[in-house]
Amino acid sequence: MRAAAGGRAAFHLRPRPPWRATHPPPATTALLSHSALASRAHHRRLPKGFLTTLEPGVSAVYLCQRARSISCNVLMEDRLQGELDGSKGEVRKHETVGAFQKIPMVMPATDILMSAQRKSRNVPPTKGIANIAKRERNKGAKQLDALMKELSVPLRTYTENFPKRRDLHPYERSLIELTFGEGYYEQVLGRVDALRKRITSVGKQHASVCAKSTTKREAEERLTEGRKKLEEAFQHGKHAIDDLVNVAKALRSMPVVDLHIPTLCLVGSPNVGKSSLVRILSSGKPEVCSYPFTTRGVLMGHIVSNHERFQVTDTPGLLTRHDDDRNNIERLTLAVLAYLPIAVLYVHDLSEDCGTSVADQYITYKHIKERFGDRLWIDVISKCDLLGKKAPTSFEDADDEVAQYRRFGPEGALRVSVTGEIGIKELKQRVHQVLTSQMARIKTEKGELGGQETGFSAAGY
């Protein structure tokens, strides 16, 4: 409502309540009283003492804008605090994995060049140019520009759509580092982008020169020279594209772990029988051989039990040594343990048929248990049919803990033999119980995160 006041127009609006959905402002206008503001502030939990700072007659529009500003600042401060926590060494949890399956298909360098050459040669001059020299230089400049774009646009697509390491889940960042080495992924993308910039520079330069030709023959010569320079520049840097092709193939072939499905991770020393257990527990078919490090990557399988679907992952064996001395194959196992919400099935071979002594197995087990003991856990003694048939290495000088471990294994461990079909039924029952408990953990964590997001949404109106 508009009213004249001292020769000046005054507007008094009643804004929409901030807790309601966005609608056009009502036609009726009035000022909110201090008592009404206090009542609404009580429900919206405005800062204490905020209303006392308002003078009588202050528009309620200002109040709502101020309230929104405060809530947005609080939300932003929380987010910034999360970033600061991450910079202090706390790993920020990303919600999903699977970025590697979304990367674009990379064409080989030869195919990109042949396609660009074919398309650029079919570009006609602009219609309506009667002068032969002008038509030829127009055609040459357009074809060089088209060749430049056909070569550079795919490269831009690759560099923009390949995920940045900082945006990846910590597990996927570890996979990149352990698969290619520190900095190689960024180096390849950097070389591809440098090639794109080089092609763009050369193309623009020669297209400009061709556009200034004064005769038909000169335009044709400059077109030929421009094509040659562009193709030479591309050929000089095509190895970056070939490297990117290999990177894309490797990343796309990596197993995808669904963070919302319970996962059982088999861990232990090399050749203790993890892969054999994966075969009987799941749909995974890892290679089973009698030599160490048969498993050289993370292999995935699935279990369907009581109409529920679970995941099983086989990991490379761990040797008895400090984490800093482990090879990249072993570090894959640590990455799974550190970054994925998994339950652990730790496999022990007390017969020493695996080639690793009981004492060394115990040292490795104790280290992993202390580091990741908060996980749901199953201990399994594999190859139990061989116990007593092979003479173990002497452990007379071993301490009581190792001797106890040698005779009985960890407390509550299941004794299993795949070849003798011993303890398989009990193992499957225990696995189902643990994965069901893991599902409850995941739902609880998901509910807590959902509650936090709902709280943020309410704070931001």
Image: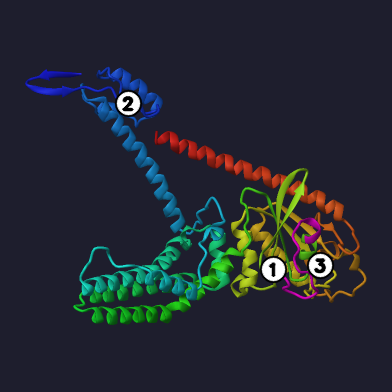
Q: Is residue 393 left or right of residue 40?
A: right
Local secondary structure at mark 2: loop
Q: Is residue 236 above or below residue 211?
A: below
Range of magenta residues: 279-295
Q: Residue furthest right?
A: 389
Local secondary structure at mark 3: loop
Query: Overall secondary structure of the magenta stretch?
Result: loop
Tag 3 residue = 349
Q: Is residue 299 above or below residue 412?
A: below
Q: Residues within 10 Å of mark 3 (few under 14, many from 20)?
A: many
Q: Quadrant of residue 326?
A: bottom right
Comparing 101 with 94, the one in front is 101
The mark closer to the camera, 3 or 2, is: 2
Cα separation, mark 3 vs mark 2, equals 72 Å
Task: Tell me the tag on residue 152.
Answer: none
**Disc on the earlier residue, 3 or 2:** 2
Q: Is residue 436 left or right of residue 385?
A: left
Three-letter code, disc 1: Pro
Tag 1 residue = 316
Q: Quadrant of the N terminus?
A: top left
Cα separation, mark 1 vs mark 2, equals 62 Å
Residue drawn at point x = 68 percent, y = 71 percent: 296
